[in-house]
Each structure stands twice: as C-alpha cells, then as structure tokens.
Amino acid sequence: MKIYLLNKTPFEGVENLVLNELVFYDFNVDLNEYDALICTSKNALKALKKANIALNLKLDLYTVGQSSADFAKDLGFKKIKFPQKAYGKNLFNEFKDELKTKKCLYLRAKHIVSALNLDLKNAGINLDEKIVYENVFKKSDKVLNHPAIFIFTSPLGVENFLKFYTLSTQDKAIAIGHTTAQRLLKFKNLFICEKQSLQACVKLAKSLL
C-alpha cells in the first residue's frame, strides 16, 4: 500500500502528490509602522523574502504553529508566539487581549479558511491586512494506486484532490487537523492527526500500513 502526501516535502517511503503551486505577489510594506506581525503560514514569511521587504526583527510575531515559528526564528525574529494548538481560532483566543494594545499587520493568502481577520477586527484590534500570495490549482497526470493512504495537509488540498481523483472505500485518509478533516467527513476511513505537523502525519500513515 502506497502513502501519498499532498505536499512537496520529501519523506522516505512516501510519494508526493502536488496539486497546487504558490504564486507570490510583488508588494511593498514598511514593517516599522507596526508593533506586531501575524502570519498563519510560513508562506507569508517567504513572501516577505521574495519581495525583498526590509525586516523589522523587533516586531512581536504571532503565528499558528511550530513550523512557522521555526522559520521566523531562522529569519532572525526573536519575539515569536504561537498557540498551543495550530489553529487561527486558538491564536485569536490566546492572544486577543495583548493584540488590542498593538498596531497589527496580518500577512495572508488570497483565500483563507479561518475567520481570524474578521475575529480580530470584531474584537476592536487595530489590524491591517495584506494579501501576499495565493495557492493556484495545478493539474496532475499521475495515476494513483488503490488502496492507498492519503495525507491531506489543508482544506484546499482536499478540494484540489477531489477535482480529479476519488477516494476508494479501501483507502485511508489522514487529515493534518480538524479544519482539513471537515472536508472529509463523508469518508469513513478518516484519521485526524493529534499533532499538526507533517512529520506526525507521516508517522501515523506508516503505522496504518
């Protein structure tokens, strides 16, 4: 039984199935005008690098998970916070009070699943948004072997998969978190990873072989 990962990150014993590509926007922003930077994906931080934006490493940086936090640390940011669980709702609930005292910039994708931006604004937080990248569907001509284990890392990944492929009754699907799992609730052999990381998803997939 094969393991397919809908992500380009390589893992031993796993075949990558990439159905999207990132398009980074050319944009300009002065980070010195803000007290806090909010990024729900490390792709937003990559967009900063791609656009050659001068970094303000003194900013308070808020992100949703360890992976993005690690990437921010590699860029040189020092004051990084993320919630206990890697969801936009958790970021809002844990940090909304301290964000009320800051001027915030939310760097995000064109299409987002969470309502973090609306939650922050409705809470009276001084928030600017800037769309810095988008995920674009990329067709694949790969022929899949069934039954198999499929690892879905985002709701968009599920949507893109179902445009051209179907899950058989003997397949197993792994969702990186509950938001992604919401798109797979009609499928019986669904497993939700307890930890929101690719490594944990792959480990779970191999345990199901």
Image (spheres, grey):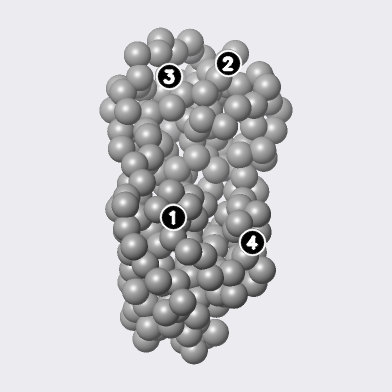
Residue picked out by circle 1:
52
Label 3 and label 1: CA atoms lie apart by 45 Å
Q: Picture coordinates of residue 7 (x, y %)?
A: 50, 32
Q: Nearer the viewer, residue 24 or 52?
A: 52
* Circle number at residue 20: none
Circle 3 SS class:
loop
**Picture quarter with the N terminus:** top right
Label 3: few (<14), some or many (≥20) within 10 Å? few
Q: Nearer the viewer, residue 125 or 34?
A: 34
Label 1 and label 4: CA atoms lie apart by 15 Å
Residue picked out by circle 4:
76
Circle 2 SS class:
strand
Label 3 and label 2: CA atoms lie apart by 14 Å
Label 4: few (<14), some or many (≥20) within 10 Å? few
Q: Picture coordinates of residue 16 (x, y %)?
A: 52, 23
Say whether marks 1 and 4 touch (CB < 8 Å). no
Residue picked out by circle 3:
168
Mark in front: 3 vs 1: 1
Q: Is residue 41 above or below residue 4?
A: below
Choose the circle earlier in sequence order: 2 or 4: 2
Choose the circle earlier in sequence order: 3 or 1: 1
Mark in front: 3 vs 2: 2
Mark in front: 2 vs 4: 4
Label 2 and label 1: CA atoms lie apart by 40 Å
Circle 1 SS class:
loop
Q: Nearer the viewer, residue 37 or 17?
A: 37
**Picture quarter with the C terminus:** top right
Label 4 and label 3: CA atoms lie apart by 45 Å
Residue picked out by circle 2:
2
Say whether marks 2 and 1 touch (CB < 8 Å). no
Choose the circle earlier in sequence order: 4 or 3: 4
Say whether marks 2 and 4 touch (CB < 8 Å). no
